[in-house]
Amino acid sequence: MAPDPAPDTTASLREPAAQIRAQLESRFWHLRFPPPLEQEFIAFLRESQRNIQLVLGGVALLMIVGFSLTDFALYGPVRDTPAAPAFLWGVFLPRWLCIASLVAGLVWGGPSDNLRLRTFTVAGLFAIVGVTTFITTAVYGNLGLPNVTTSYALIIVAAFMPCGLLFRESLALGLLLWAAGLAVVQLVLEPGHAEPGWLLVSMMLVALVLAMSSAYMREHALREQFLLRSLVDWEAGHDPLTGLANRRALALAVPTVLRQAAREKVPVALAVIDVDHFKAYNDHYGHQGGDEVLRQLAQHLAGYARRPLDLAVRMGGEEFALLCYGEGAESLAGRMRQMQAGLRAQALPHAESPVAAHVTVSAGVAGLPVVGAGKISNDDAAAVLDALYRDADALLYRAKNEGRDRVVC
């Protein structure tokens, strides 16, 4: 007879996947996820569009440099006229300030790994390019010189391009640029040229609405792609029953763990754990009862993966593993005995076990005292993992042969 159904003890381990599925079902029309997932999306957005930021910055720099060459050509006719000071202060100075800001942003802000710095750099450069362009265009209009008036609307549209900004950030930037354009029309344009200026501001507002709609749909689609990819990645690296990492995740994690251990000259240990007489348990209590035992063990094991580089794994069937960073085999064996004691205290009944009246586990623990220095390739890491697993697995079978319910190090 199977034991009474117990609550799902590993629901918390599968919480990331459940949260992703919940967001997919909610459709997230407000373009915001719960805090941890939102931070992951923002980091993904900033990093995935890093190259686009650099390309847009480079294109903007080339365009502004091209405009500055036009400035020199148009300055000739007004060089010796009363309009020369207005041209110097209203065209050359803003244009050169814009070029200097773009160069500084590309040199210092673009390559930075600081996502927040890059975001402020992008937004700041958009604001500088927009304001300086509005001023130079207005001064051109006051002087009766030819100018690209459509640049007002183009700058608004550019603020909503995929350049690492969230929709709400692009919207704030677009409104700021529109307000700056409005201020320039009021403060810089002379009365005789104000009417075309108001037409430009109206064009900017239309461009703002159109670009905002397109940017909203683009970010919504990008968020959906992010959720789907995150769900696929999680499911590819985790066991669906227990929520623990699987063999694939272990293989992917080992190179990072070994390289960090080599840098810090610390040991690495691996424990392989197996439920004693699990087939007999399944036969007696049914697969639902067996699944619950596996979830209970997974919950216990996850509690021992305390460091960021530790990893609790379901290897398959009733076999589990625990990879521990910065811990020797003897120390890990001691903690595995603590885990055994916790299971004994829980006293999950196992009427068919010749070892005890409750569920027990056996474990084998092997370790690397200190990981050797030097470059560790993925092939080297795979070979080390294979060797560690073989050693720990051999010790596990030794524990079984010695009577089970024990840890052999």
Image (tube, grey):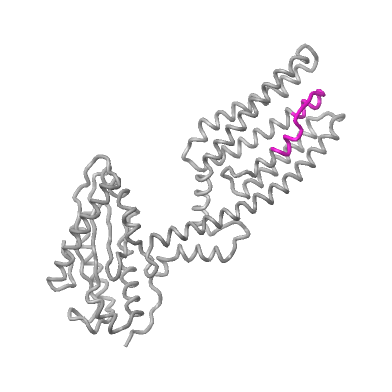
Give how far across and how far down residue 208 sits, in percent: 72, 45
Q: Name the residue furthest front.
A: 379
Q: In this view, does 108 lie to the left or right of 201?
A: left
Position of residue 85 relative to residue 101, above or below, is above
Name the dominant secondary structure of the magenta segment. Answer: helix
Give how far across and how far down residue 205 sits, in percent: 76, 44
Position of residue 59 relative to residue 299, above or below, is above
At a point 16% along the width and 71% down the height, the residue shown is: 400
Q: Nearer the viewer, residue 385 or 18?
A: 385
Position of residue 384 relative to residue 240, above or below, is above
Give how far across and how far down residue 377 sits, in percent: 29, 44
Q: Name the residue furthest bottom.
A: 1
Residue 221 position by quadrant: bottom right
Q: Could you tell me which quadrant the N terminus lies in?
A: bottom left
The span picked out in magenta is 137-154
At a point 79% along the width and 34% down the height, the residue shown is: 185
At a point 81% along the width and 23% down the height, the residue shown is: 143
Q: Name the residue furthest left.
A: 402
Q: Name the residue furthest right.
A: 192
Q: Nearer the viewer, residue 374 or 177?
A: 374
Q: Is residue 152 highlighted in magenta?
A: yes
